[in-house]
Amino acid sequence: MAISPIALQHLRTPTATKLPDGLKPGQIAFNLANKWLLVGCAGDDVLVRGQAVAAGSGTIFGVTNVVVPAKVATARPATGAVAGSMYQGEGYEIFNLEGEGLGSGPTLPVAANGSKGDLFVVVPAVGAPYLMLHNGSNWVSPTVPPKVFSATQAEITTAAGADITAKALVVIIAKTGSGITAKGDLHSGDILIVAGPGADAGSYVYDGSSFIKTGAAIPDATAPNAAGTGAVKGVVQLARDTDITETGDPAATTNNANGVVTAKQLRGLADQIAGLITGSTLLGTYDGSTSGIASLTSVAAANGRAGLVVAGKLSAGTGLKEGDFFVVSKAGTAVGDHARINGVLAANDHIVYVGGADVWHVISSGLVATPLSLHGCGDVSDSAVAAVAPDKMKGVLVRDSSVAADGAANAYKLVQVLDLGEF
C-alpha cells in the first residue's frame, strides 16, 4: 500500500514585528515576513549574531519595532539533575536567511534600517559598485577599500584633472601616449596595468615614489645556463632531472639553486628512499590469469635490470636486486614461470625476489573473505490504541482529544499535515 507524503508545518508567524515568547532547545520557528530562522539555544536571551538583544521594541536586521520578549527570570537550580550546565532556558537566536545583513541595490537603505556590522553594496546606474558598512548609527565607507579604476593615459601622466585618491589601487589604462608617472594618493605596492601595444605596455608596481615596470625588474623564467647558474631569485623555475641526480653520477649537472622539484621528480626520490628503508623496490604488477607481467615501473628498466617485459615471465629477469617485488593485480593459476610462483595466486599477493636458488617467493596478501550474516529482529508487540481501516491507513497517528477524551486509549487520529501552529 502506498503511503502518502506527510507535510510538516513549523511554528511560524506572518507578522514582521512578532517574535515567539520562547523556544525549547533545538526547536525552530520562522518569521515568514522577514525570512528569519529562529533556533532554540537553551539560554535565557534572544540573540542576534551571538549578542543578546534588549527586551522591548527594537531594530533587528534593519526591521524596526520588532517586539523582543523579556527573558524569563527562572533561577538555575543549585543542585539536582538540572543544576548548573544542565539548565535549559527557552532563549533563541535569530538568523537572517536573506544574507545575514548583506544586501545590494542602487541606493543605500536608511540608517535606521541597518544594524552594526551590516554590509551593503551600492550598485549605481553609472559608475562602479562600492561597499558600505553600518557602524551602528550610519552607513560609512570601509577604512581602506580596495578599488579598481579604468583611466586614460592623460589622467595618469598629466598634471591637470582630478587626482585618483584610492588606496590599495589597481589602475588599468588604455595606451595612448608615452611615459608613466605617479599621480594622486598612491602607496607603495599599488599596481598599474598598461594595456595595448607599445613599449610601455605591461604591469607596473609603485615603489613609493615612481612606477617600476615589473618586466624590467623581474625577468622571464628561463632555463639556467649549463653551469646551473644565471637564475634570478624570486623567479620560479622547474628543476631539471639532472639537477637532482646524486653527486658522482656521470649524468649529474651543477644544480640550479632556485629550481623547484616537480611532483614526478619528488615521487622518484621518494621511491628510492622507500627502497633504502625497506630494502624493497616495486617493479610492477603480475597477472596470475595469464602467467605474465601486467605492467612495469620505470625502476624495472633501470640500474642494470633486464629481461623484464610486459606479458613476459619473471624467470626471464636478470640483474635483479634482493627485495625487488611484483604485486599480483589479477588472481589466477600461474604456469610456465619460475617454479616457486607456479600455482594459485590471489590478488594483492607479493612476489618477492630473494636471490639464491629459490629466486622468487610468494608472500600471501593475508586477505581472507569473511562471510557476513544478516540478523532479523522480531516485531515489538503492543496493545491496539485505535482501530484503523486498511483504506484509511495513511498519514501520522497523533494524539487528539477531539476524537475521544484525553487519556482514552482511542484518543488518536491519522493526519497528513502536521501543523505546529503560529505564534
Image: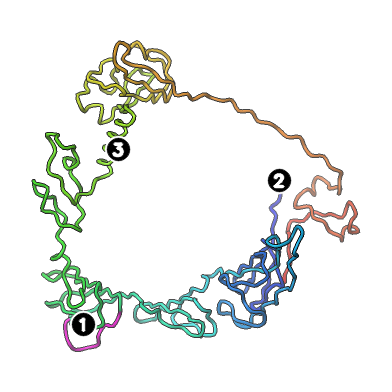
Q: Earlier in the sequence, mark 3 or mark 2?
A: 2
Image vertical order of residue 404 relative to residue 284, above or below: below
Residue type, numbered disc 1: Lys
Q: Residue at x 32, y 27 (%)?
A: 280
Name the mark nearer the viewer: 3 or 2.
3
Q: Quadrant of the N terminus?
A: top right
Horizontal side of residue 147 vs 14, given as left or right: left
Residue picked out by circle 1: 183
Disc 2 to disc 1, how far (Cα)? 76 Å
Per the image, the residue denoted by label 2 is 2
Q: Position of residue 394 (x, y in %)?
A: 75, 50
- What is the magenta range? 157-166
In-image side of 394 versus 136 (left or right)? right
Q: Which residue is mark 3?
A: 270
Residue at x 51% of width, y 79% of height? 116
- Mark 1 or mark 3, which is nearer the start of the sequence? 1
Query: Where 109 sits versus 374, above or below?
Result: below
Relative height, residue 94 to residue 358 (above, below): below
- In depth, the one of 265 and 30 nearer the eye is 265
Image quarter of residue 376: top right
* Position of the C terminus by quadrant: bottom right
Image quadrant of residue 408? Answer: bottom right
Amino acid found under the numbered disc labelled 2? Ala
Is 161 included in the stretch rendered in magenta? Answer: yes
Q: Residue at x 79, y 39 (%)?
A: 380
Q: How many marks?
A: 3
Can you say whether 58 is above or below 7 in the image? below
Task: Say which quarter of the image contains residue 12.
Answer: bottom right
Type of the residue with mark 3: Ala
Q: CA distance from mark 3 to mark 2?
A: 59 Å
